[in-house]
Image (spheres, grey):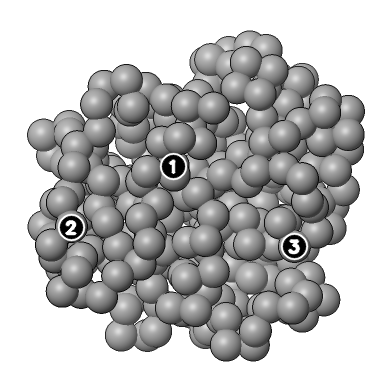
Amino acid sequence: MALAVLLASASLVAAAPSLVARQAITPLTTAEIDVFTPYTYYAAAGYCTPATTLAWNCGTNCEANPDFEPVAAGGDGNSVQYWYVGWDPKLETVIVAHQGTNTSQLLPVLTDASFVLESLNATLFPGVSSSVKAHSGFANEQAKTATTILSAVQTAISKYGAKNVTLVGHSLGAALALLDSVYLPLHVSGVTFSTVTYGMPRVGNLDFADLASDRPISHINNKWVLLWLLLIDPVPTLPYQFMGYVHPTGEIHIEDSGAWDNCPGMDNPSTLCSTGDVPTLLNGNVNDHDGPYNGVEITCS
């Protein structure tokens, strides 16, 4: 798969700051950028209601992947984020997508505000060290659907003879996708997992970032981003590093020029990457959070 090759090259091993500084920040080619576009549409479709998603008739963003075959979907968009699982025969991968933050609903906002780091659930994440910690709100949200999504993924793998599973999401949905990227491989073998996220907040501590970086991942951030000060919608600059949070490897930062740059290491401090580009919340622009990502706005349209 083109995506697997691209993610493998983009997901560089975490390095000491001095080494990160010496690693080249390289732009993606137009062809490499285009590889991500189907997954961008899948992340956008995560904002649609499950019934609409299963009918696969939720507008332009669904029509962009017309061969998609839904397997399962759920959530209510409030107490449980929407999610869906299905098969893309063209990309030859199972797709697992999560809804992002819906600021019109209170409970997702409260989920985002739970900034405490906690060890992962030992039942859901067997064998994972207690030193691996994640944002409690994100972890609690992921736990609500973990086993149901696992069952749906197993069904899709069996039904289509799948060898690849791709996890996608935007904002809060990106955080849930990253947690699933650690969770699902603990329970499913014989397939390759890849993760593509957009506008992803920091999800866990350094040990979590190390574990998440063991698998192919690209987290794509669009220009500058900003916190909704009252609604607390987390974006790539949040939660703060001083609180113990670290991004995994695999960042791709879309510059103001429109160039897409690979940013090696974790939280690369270069001004070509999110951490260096947005030193304070006042430097951001919330309008960039939903896109465009190569021309795609991440909304249910």
Q: Which residue is mark 1?
A: 7
Residue 124 at what x, y percent from top left? 78, 70
Counting residues from the start of the chain, the first of labels 2 and 3 encountered is 2
Q: Which residue is mark 2?
A: 23
Residue 290 at what x, y percent from top left? 37, 40
Q: Are marks 2 and 3 in contact (CB under 8 Å)?
A: no
Q: Quadrant of residue 238?
A: bottom left
Of 150 and 41, which appears nearest the observer?
150
Work out whether residue 59 can be spotted: no
| 56 to 184, vertically: above or below | above
| 162 to 281, vertically: above or below | above
Residue 136 at what x, y percent from top left? 59, 77
Of 94 and 110, which appears nearest the observer?
94
For the residues labelled 2 and 3, the Cα–Cα distance comes to 32 Å
Q: Which residue is mark 3?
A: 186
For the residues labelled 1 and 3, the Cα–Cα distance comes to 20 Å
Task: Kindly state the secondary structure of the residue where label 1 is placed.
Answer: helix
Task: Kindly state the secondary structure of the residue where label 2 is placed.
Answer: loop
